[in-house]
Image (tube, rainbow, N blue to C red):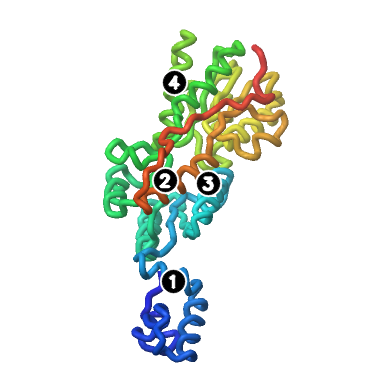
Amino acid sequence: MITIKEVSELAQVSQSTVSRALNEHPTVKEANRKKVFDAIEQLGYKPNAFAQALASSRSNSVGMLVGSLDGPFYGPLMHMAEDTVRKSNIHLIVTSGQESKTKELDSIRFLQSKQVDGLIIHSDQLTDDELIQIAQKSESTIILNRYIPEISDRCIYIDNELGGYLATKHLLEHGHTKVACITGQMSKVDSRDRLQGYRNALAEFSIRYDASLIVEGRFDHQGNHEAARRLLDRDPEISAIFCQNDNIALAVYDVASERHLKIGEDIAVVGFDNDTHSQHIRPRLTTVNFPVHEMGVEAAKGVLSLINKQTYPLKHKLTPELVIRDSVNQK
C-alpha cells in the first residue's frame, strides 16, 4: 500500500495538504487538490479507494504464495482466487517460491512488507512449525494443501488418501492384481497419503503390498520417464499402474509407446489431478479429479472472512472424484 508520504513527494505538496485534500477540506487550493489526486492515480490507486484504505488501515490486497506461476494446477488455483477476491474489490498479489524454501520465505516477507490484508499460502518447502509461526503473525492466513492440527481451522486440503484408494480400487475392480504405483516425491505428505490409499485398496482386495512395485517419480519429464522405464524393466508382468499425478501418466504413455504396449489394452493407467492433458491424450486418461477450482474459491472466501472478521463455513477437506475415461481395460 502507498503512503501519504509517497503521495506528498510525488505531488510536491506537504503531507498535511494530502490529508486535507483526501478529507475534502475547503482550505485546499484546487491546483494542490489536483496534484494530490493525480499523484495517487500515478501510483496505481483510485483516490476514493486510497482514502478508504487509509481510513481502515487496509491495503485492499491479498498476498498469495504458490510453487510456480504456470502449470495445470497453479494456473486455475490463482485464477479462481483472483476472480473471487476481485468481486470484493480486493487485488491479489501473487509470488512464486519456485520449489525453494529460501524463496518461499523471501516471498512471504515481500508480501508482508506490502502490508497485504491477508495471505493464501501453498507451500511445499516450509515445515508445519514455520507455517504455524506465519499464521500466528498474520492472523488472516489460509494454508492450502496441508493439514496442520494446530491451525486446522485455516487449512484447506484434499483427501489424498481417498484419491489414492479410488484410483487403485478402480484398477482392482477391473481384474488387475499386479498393480504398480509411481509416486510423487515421497518427502511430500500428499504423495505419502496417496500411497496409503493405494495400500488400503490392496488390503481390501486381500492383495499383499509389494514394495518392488513402487517407484518414486520426479517433477521433471525426464525423471518421470526414467521412473516408468525402471518400473517396467523391473517386472514385465505389471498390468496396471497408478500414477500419482497426470504428468507421470503422460510419461508412462510415452514409455509404453516405446515398448509397443497399448494403453487400455496391454496395460491400464490411472492418473491423479484431471488436468487439461488428461482429456486430450489418446486414449483419454482415467484419473482422479483434484478440485483445484473449488480450492481457489474456498481459499479466497476463507481469507476474506478472516479479514472482515466474519463467519464463513469453510470447506476444509475437499473430496476427490474418479473420472472414468478410456485408459483402463478389463483384465
Task: Determine the CA span between mark 2 and mark 1.
Answer: 24 Å
Q: Amino acid at mark 2?
A: Gly
Residue 210 horizontal/vertical position (percent): 45, 17
Residue 322: quarter of image? top right
Residue labelled with disc 1: 50
Mark 1 surroundings: few (<14), some (14-19) or many (≥20) residues within 10 A:
many
Task: Determine the CA span between mark 2 and mark 4.
Answer: 40 Å
Residue 159: quarter of image? top left
Q: Amino acid at mark 1?
A: Phe
Residue 50 horizontal/vertical position (percent): 44, 71
Residue at the spot 66% in from the left edge and 13% down from the top edge = 330
Mark seen at residue 77: 3
Residue labelled with disc 2: 302
For marks 3 and 2 on the same chain, the one whose residue lies earlier in the sequence: 3
Residue 22 horizontal/vertical position (percent): 42, 78
Marks 4 and 2: in contact by CB < 8 Å?
Answer: no
Residue that lies at the very extreme toward the top in this rendered image: 206
Residue at the spot 44% in from the left edge and 49% down from the top edge = 99
Find numbered disc 1 in the image and state the secondary structure of the residue it sits on.
Answer: helix
From what the image shows, is residue 171 above or below residue 218? above
Residue 116: quarter of image? bottom left
Mark 2 surroundings: few (<14), some (14-19) or many (≥20) residues within 10 A:
many
